[in-house]
C-alpha cells in the first residue's frame, strides 16, 4: 500500500489509516511519503514529510531541487513496488501529480481530504476526474460538488467531529495554566503558520487590550511553531496572556474566541465555542484572492457578498450555507470592530444563544448517518478497490463467492 501525506494533519490521519488497515489486513505493508506518526504506525518512509512541506513561493523555489528529488524517489518506489492501491491525503501540489503516475500503472487511488478545488484552481478538477478512483471528502457540500462533475465522491464526516470532549475540569485547567477561574477566559487563535501569526496576532492583542483587565486570554501554540514567535510579539504589546498547547481544551473552556480562518474555525464549531473569524494578508495577496476565489452556486450564491464585497472565507459559514459567524477580513479586521462584536458573545445575549445553536447544527452536519468513523469509511473504500485474489488453478470457488 502506498500512502502519501505531507502535512501534520495528514500524517495523523495516515497513521490512523495504517493502523485500521493492518487490523483488517494483517499482512499489509505501507510505504511512501509521511511524517513521524505514520512511521511509528509502520510506514516505510521513502520521503519524510518534514523535508517537503514548504509553504510559500520563496520557500518552494529555495527548496525546489530537494523537493523534486524527493518526488522522483517516490515515483521510482511506486514503479518498483507496484502497490495494490494508494491513499493520498490532502497535500495537492504533490499528491495530484503522484496520482498521475499511479494512474499510468493502473493503481487505484483513494484521495482523502479534498483540495479546495471548489474555491480555486478549478482547472485541477480535470486531474481528479482522470486520476482519482474514489474521493473521500470531509465537508458535506464537497460530495455534491464532485458528483455533479462525474467524480465518485463520498462524504465520510469530519474527523474533528468524532473527537471526545475534553475531560479536564475548569478548576484543573486553571491550576494547570495559572488562570483565575473567577474571570472569563477568551481564546486567541492567530493561525498555525509563522506569517499568519505575524499578520493576525498584533490586532488580536489589541482586542485583548480593549476588553480590559476583567478577562484572561488563552493562546494555543501550534506544534508547527516556536513559542519564541509569540513571546517576542507579546513582550512588545501585551504581557497578561497564557500560552497553552491544546487548542481544543482552550476552546472548550473559553467563554468566546477570536479565530483566524482555517481548520481552527471547525474546531471551534465542533466544540460549540462562540467566536469571530479574522484574517489579514498582504494587499496584493488579497486582491489576487478576490479575483481567483469563486464558489459554485451549489455551495454559495455568487452574488451573496457582504457589505464590503467579500465572499465568506470561514468554513463554518460555508458548511451552514449562511453567515452564522461574523468575519473581519483585511481593513475590517480592526481591534475596535472585533472587540465590539466579541462583547456580545461574552455576555448572555440573544446573539450568543443563537450562535451556540447554529454551531450545534454545523456539528451535526459534519457527522453523516453512519456507524463508521471517517477513518473506517476510508478503509472500507480501500478494501473495495483492492484487487480480488485469483483462485488457484483447478480450484472451483464456493457457491456465492
Image: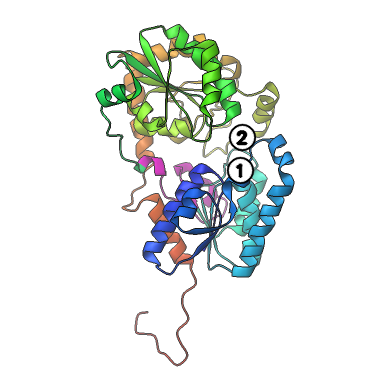
Q: Is 386 in front, or is 49?
A: 49
Expressed as whole percent of the image width and height from the top left, the position of residue 176 reads 32, 25
The answer to whether any part of residue 14 appears in the image is no
Of the 4 image quadrants, the one containing the C terminus is: bottom left
Residue in the foreground of this view, choosing between 128 and 207: 207
**Crowd rating for badge 2 (residues with CA inside 10 Å; few <14, some 14–19, many 20+):** some
Residue 258 left/right relative to 66:
left
- Asked if 199 appears above or below 52 in the picture, the reply is above
- Residue 84 higher or lower than 126, as above or below: below
Query: Disc 2 designates what residue?
Result: 294
Residue 261 at what x, y percent from top left?
A: 52, 28
Is 152 included in the stretch rendered in magenta?
Answer: yes
Mark 1 lies on residue: 53
Q: Check disc 1 and report its element: helix, strand or loop.
A: loop
Q: Residue at x 45, y 53 (%)?
A: 40
Q: Residue at x 59, y 18 (%)?
A: 308
| Residue 278, image x, y percentages | 52, 22
Write the start and end of the magenta stretch as one range.
Answer: 136-161
Left or right, residue 303 beside residue 166? right
Amino acid at each position: 500500500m502506498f500512502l502519501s501525506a505531507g502535512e501534520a494533519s495528514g500524517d495523523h490521519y495516515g497513521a490512523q489509516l495504517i493502523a485500521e488497515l493492518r487490523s483488517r489486513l494483517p499482512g499489509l505493508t505501507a510505504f511512501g511519503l509521511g511524517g513521524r506518526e505514520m512511521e511509528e504506525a509502520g510506514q516505510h518512509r521513502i520521503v519524510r514529510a518534514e523535508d517537503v512541506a514548504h509553504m510559500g513561493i520563496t520557500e518552494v523555489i529555495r527548496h525546489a531541487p530537494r523537493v523534486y528529488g524527493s518526488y522522483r524517489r517516490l515515483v521510482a518506489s511506486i514503479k518498483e513496488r507496484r502497490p495494490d492501491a494508494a491513499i493520498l491525503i490532502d497535500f495537492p501540489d504533490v499528491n495530484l501529480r503522484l496520482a498521475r503516475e499511479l494512474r499510468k500503472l493502473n493503481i487505484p487511488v483513494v484521495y482523502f481530504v479534498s483540495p479546495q478545488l471548489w474555491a480555486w484552481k478549478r482547472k485541477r478538477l480535470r486531474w481528479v476526474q482522470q486520476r482519482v478512483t474514489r474521493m473521500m471528502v470531509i465537508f458535506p457540500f464537497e460530495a455534491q460538488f464532485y458528483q455533479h462533475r462525474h467524480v465518485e465522491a463520498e462524504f465520510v464526516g469530519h474527523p474533528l467531529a468524532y473527537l471526545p470532549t475534553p475531560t479536564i475540569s475548569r478548576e484543573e485547567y486553571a491550576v494547570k495554566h495559572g488562570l483565575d477561574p473567577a474571570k472569563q477566559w477568551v481564546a486567541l487563535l492567530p493561525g498555525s503558520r509563522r506569517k499568519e501569526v505575524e499578520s493576525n496576532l498584533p490586532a488580536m492583542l489589541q482586542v485583548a487590550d480593549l476588553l480590559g483587565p476583567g478577562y484572561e486570554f488563552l493562546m494555543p501554540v501550534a506544534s508547527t511553531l516556536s513559542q519564541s514567535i509569540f513571546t517576542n510579539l507579546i513582550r512588545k504589546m501585551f504581557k497578561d496572556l497564557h500560552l497553552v498547547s491544546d487548542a481544543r481544551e482552550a476552546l472548550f473552556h473559553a467563554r468566546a474566541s477570536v479565530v483566524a480562518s482555517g481548520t481552527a474555525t471547525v474546531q471551534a464549531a465542533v466544540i460549540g465555542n462562540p467566536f469571530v473569524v479574522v484574517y489579514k494578508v498582504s494587499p496584493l495577496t488579497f486582491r489576487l484572492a478576490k479575483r481567483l476565489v469563486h464558489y459554485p452556486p451549489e455551495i454559495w450564491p455568487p452574488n451573496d457578498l457582504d457589505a464590503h464585497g467579500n465572499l465568506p472565507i470561514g468554513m463554518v459559514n460555508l458548511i451552514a450555507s449562511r453567515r452564522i459567524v461574523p468575519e473581519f477580513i483585511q481593513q475590517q479586521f480592526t481591534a475596535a470592530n472585533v472587540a465590539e462584536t466579541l462583547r456580545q458573545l461574552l455576555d448572555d445575549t440573544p446573539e450568543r444563544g443563537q450562535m451556540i445553536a447554529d454551531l450545534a447544527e454545523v456539528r451535526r452536519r459534519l457527522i453523516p448517518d453512519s456507524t463508521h468513523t471517517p477513518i473506517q469509511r476510508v478503509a472500507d473504500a480501500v478494501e473495495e478497490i483492492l484487487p480480488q485474489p485469483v483462485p488457484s488453478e483447478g480450484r472451483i470457488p464456493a457457491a456465492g463467492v
